[in-house]
Amino acid sequence: EFNIISVGAISVRKGVIYLIKAFNELNLKNSKLTLIGDIEKGFKKTLLPLINDKIEIISSIKQNSLKEYYNCADVFVTCSIEEGLSMVQIQAMACGLPVISSENSGGEDIINEGEDGFILKIRDKDRLKEKLLLLYENKNLLALMSKKAELKAHTHFSWENYGNKVANFYLDILKKNEKLFLL
C-alpha cells in the first residue's frame, strides 16, 4: 500500500483541499491518504463530499504519537497556502519520509528539490499529482529520497546541531564586538 500522510489543521489555510482532490483524481491502486488534525469549523461541509474509503481522518494527537503514523507512511505532504516553517515536515523527514511541500510552508529552507522532497507552488494540484505519481511508480526513487530525508533530518536538524549553531552564532557576535566588551 502507498501511504500518504499530512499533519496539521484540516482547513482552507492548510490547502488540504488540493491534496484531497489530487489524491482522488489519481485514484492510485493500493493507496491511502491519512489526514491528522482537527477539522476547521465551517470546513466540514466542503470536506465531507470529497472523503472516501481510501481517506482516513484522525483528530489531533500528541506529538510523541505522530511517529507511529509517520512510520506507516511513504510520503508526507503539506499544501499550506500560508504559514511559517511547518515543523511537521522535519518530523516526517526524521522518520524517513520524503516531503512534498508548498513553497509557503518553509519547505524551501529544508528540502533539496528532487533529493529529499519536492517544492510546489501553492494550489498547484497538477504538479502535486505529478510528484505523487512519480513516487508511487518509482519505488527505488522513493527509497532513495526516504534515506536522504532521514539523513538530512538527523544531521542538519538535530537538537545538537541546533545548539551548536546557536552557540557559534553568539561566539561570532562576541568576537566581532570584542573591543566593546574590553572598554
Image (cartoon, rainbow, N blue to C red):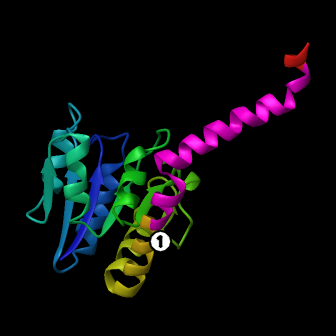
Residue furthest left in the image: 53
Residue furthest top in the image: 183
Left or right relative to 112: residue 39: left
Provide residue 49's location: percent of width, then percent of height: 14, 52
Assess disc 1: are there few (<14), some (14-19) or many (≥20) residues with their C-alpha within 10 Å of its C-alpha.
Answer: many
Res 156 → quadrant: bottom right
Residue furthest front in the image: 182
Of residues 7 and 173, which is closer to you in this image?
A: 173
Provide residue 72's location: percent of width, then percent of height: 20, 66
Left or right relative to 52: residue 66: right
Q: Residue at x 70, y 32 (%)?
A: 170
Provide residue 79's location: percent of width, then percent of height: 40, 52
Res 128 → quadrant: bottom left
Quarter of the rendering occupied by the N terminus: bottom left
Residue 130 visible in image: yes
Residue 36 visible in image: no
**Position above or below: 96 against 2:** above
Left or right relative to 23: residue 150: right
The residue segment tinted magenta is: 151-179
Of residues 167 and 56, which is closer to you in this image?
A: 167
Res 60 → quadrant: top left
**Position above or below: 75 against 34:** below
Q: Residue at x 42, y 73 (%)?
A: 147
Quarter of the rendering occupied by the C terminus: top right
Of residues 6 and 15, which is closer to you in this image?
A: 6
- Pointer 1 residue: 148
